[in-house]
Image (cartoon, rainbow, N blue to C red):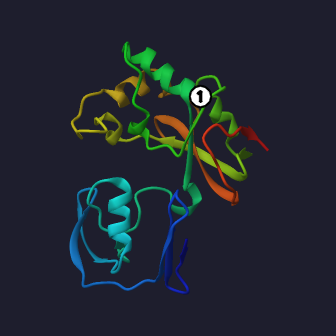
């Protein structure tokens, strides 16, 4: 929970523990944002250590620099949805025997019970996800990051080549569409197994 006007940041972990408060920043450090060097200020206090403990690897939390605009869609696309059937369609297109690792696509929600790319029909509609409601704004156009193994970072898939083979001519809001993005219009709790349905 971030309140930029009040200058506060709080994290709530799955076990119910909450940490944070007023944000204090350290001196600027050089960081790399997708290959772009930026000067960013680390968030002081216990949050980085708590995130590291939760994720099981060392992490540091930085405030976004004024000149470090996000490469993604910000609050207008903070949620992504992708049907599991779309992953299976991509696997078949690639001629692979193993399932496609969904982590390549960094989706917020994997949705079962849909046909391949049925989520495309949700654009400009509200969708109920568990106790929340989101407004689907457009397709997620995919980039070269999807070609990399989620564990090693090594390029090991021609993901974009396979997408282009059957999705290049699809009417879309972004090139090489795979999944959709949305923004939250009604916050709510979401659990694994909750229904995902057009509102």
In the figure, 162 relative to 42: above or below? above
Q: Quadrant of the N terminus?
A: bottom right
- 155 lies left or right of 114: left
Q: Could you tell me which quadrant the C terminus lies in?
A: top right
Q: Position of residue 167 (x, y in %)?
A: 49, 26
Residue 82 as seen in the image, left or right of residue 132: left
Q: Nearer the viewer, residue 83 or 1?
A: 1
Which residue is labeled 1 in the image?
A: 117
Residue drawn at (25%, 29%) of the image = 156
**Residue 99 vertical placement versus 144 (above, below):** above
Q: How many marks?
A: 1
The quarter of the displayed image where residue 69 is located: bottom left
Does residue 33 appear in the picture of this structure? yes
Residue at 21% from the left image edge and 76% from the top image edge:
29
Asked which secondary structure carries label 1, the reply is: loop
* Residue 169 placement (x, y as % from top left): 51, 27
Q: Position of residue 100 (x, y in %)?
A: 40, 26
Return the residue found at the far right. Answer: 199
Image coordinates of residue 181 in percent, x first then y, are: 57, 47
Q: Bin the neighbour count of mark 1 within 10 Å (Cα to Cα): few under 14, some 14-19, many 20 and up.
A: some
Q: At x 31% / y 34%, what residue is drawn?
A: 147
Name the residue nearer the viewer: 123 or 100: 100
Q: Nearer the viewer, residue 180 or 176?
A: 180
The answer to whether residue 125 shows anywhere in this view is no
Q: Is residue 57 above or below residue 41?
A: above
């Amino acid at each position: 929970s971030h309140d930029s006007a009040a200058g506060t940041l709080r994290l709530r972990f799955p076990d119910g523990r909450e940490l944070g408060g007023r944000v204090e920043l350290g001196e600027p450090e050089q960081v790399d944002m997708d290959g772009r060097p930026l000067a960013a200020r680390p968030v002081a206090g216990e949050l980085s250590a708590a995130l590291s403990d939760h994720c099981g690897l060392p992490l540091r939390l930085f405030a976004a620099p004024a000149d470090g605009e996000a490469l993604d869609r910000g609050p207008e696309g903070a949620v992504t949805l992708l049907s599991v059937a779309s992953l299976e369609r991509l696997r078949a297109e690639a001629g692979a025997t193993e399932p496609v690792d969904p982590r390549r696509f960094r989706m917020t929600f994997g949705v079962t019970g849909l046909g391949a790319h049925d989520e495309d029909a949700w654009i400009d509609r509200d969708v109920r996800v568990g106790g929340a409601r989101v407004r689907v704004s457009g397709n997620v156009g995919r980039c070269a990051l999807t070609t990399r193994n989620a564990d090693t970072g090594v390029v090991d898939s021609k993901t974009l080549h396979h997408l282009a083979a059957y999705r290049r001519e699809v009417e879309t809001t972004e090139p090489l569409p795979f999944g959709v993005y949305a923004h939250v219009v009604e916050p709510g709790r979401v659990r694994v197994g909750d229904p995902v349905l057009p509102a």
